[in-house]
Every structure is written in structure tokens, then in C-alpha cells.
Amino acid sequence: MDNDKVRMYVSIANQQIYSHKHDSPWEYEVEMSREFLPVFNQLFTQIGRLEFSNFLRGHSRPFLPYHYDRDNHDIDRRTMKLYALIHEFTDDETKKFIEKLPYFTKGNPKITSAPVQPSS
């Protein structure tokens, strides 16, 4: 099982996963089974579609703040899933860094699907 693991380089900023270290700038190095590659690609594709939907919403309903938009929360959830995947397949130093991120929690996620209501 360990023989089919590959080293990949993930860029959250560019929404890409690379097989070669020098293909493009990347933020995280992971070592995983090839069966997880489509998961990364699917999450990046979904985030791209949601961001485009947010772009269109911003032009058609500019009066609606982005933090009340469901698509914005869906992007956050998928980003959290990406970090959870990276956390699963990376080294200890990177795991510690990801665990310090404000939205990475073991247990209950901090982001919900319901819009955040302003406090009075």
C-alpha cells in the first residue's frame, strides 16, 4: 500500500495540485495515495464554481453583504476540507501549523451553513 503513495505539492492560493516541486509555487507538500487526487481536484473545481457564482451575485445583488451569502460559507467549508486533507497527508511541522489556523478545529467546525447574523 505504501508503494502507491506519491508526493504532491498543493497550492491553496492557486487552487492547484502539482506532481513536480518546480512546476509552480506551492504552499504544502503531501504524500498520499493517488486515489485522493480526484478529491483535491473536485474541491478546487467546486471552489472555483462557487467563487464565480459569488462574482455574479456581487454584480446582480450588490446590496447583499458577502458574509450573508450561502456560497461564501460553502467556499469556507470546502477550504476547511482541503486543509483537513493536507493535515492528514503532510509532515508533523505542517500539521502543527494547520492546527493553529483559526478555522481548523478537531470536532465542531466554526463555520456553519447558516448566514452569520450581526450582533446587536
Image (cartoon, helix red, strand yellow):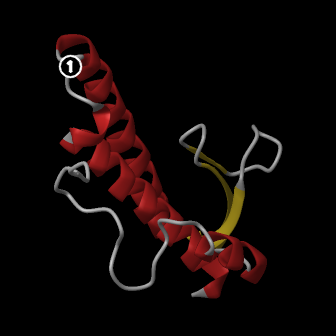
Which amino acid, by three-letter code, is at mark 1? Phe
Q: Is residue 42 above or below residue 2?
A: above
Which quadrant holds residue 32?
A: bottom right
If the image is split into quadrants, where does the N terminus sit? bottom right
Residue at 47% from the left image edge and 60% from the top image edge: 82
**Could you tell me if residue 119 is visible in this image?**
yes
| Residue 53 located left or right of residue 83 | left
**Hey, which residue is sitting farthest front in the picture?**
120
| Residue 89 located left or right of residue 42 | right
Q: Position of residue 60 (x, y in %)?
A: 18, 12
Residue at 29% from the left image edge and 49% from the top image edge: 73
Q: Position of residue 2 (x, y in %)?
A: 63, 86
Residue at 26% from the left image edge and 53% from the top image edge: 119
Which quadrant holds residue 24?
A: top right
Q: Is residue 70 above or below residue 87?
A: above
**Could you tell me if residue 34 is visible in this image?**
no
Residue at 21% from the left image edge and 38% from the top image edge: 69
Q: Which residue is mark 1?
A: 63
- Callout 1: few (<14), some (14-19), or many (20+) C-alpha neighbours within 10 Å? few
- Most foreground residue, 63 or 18: 63
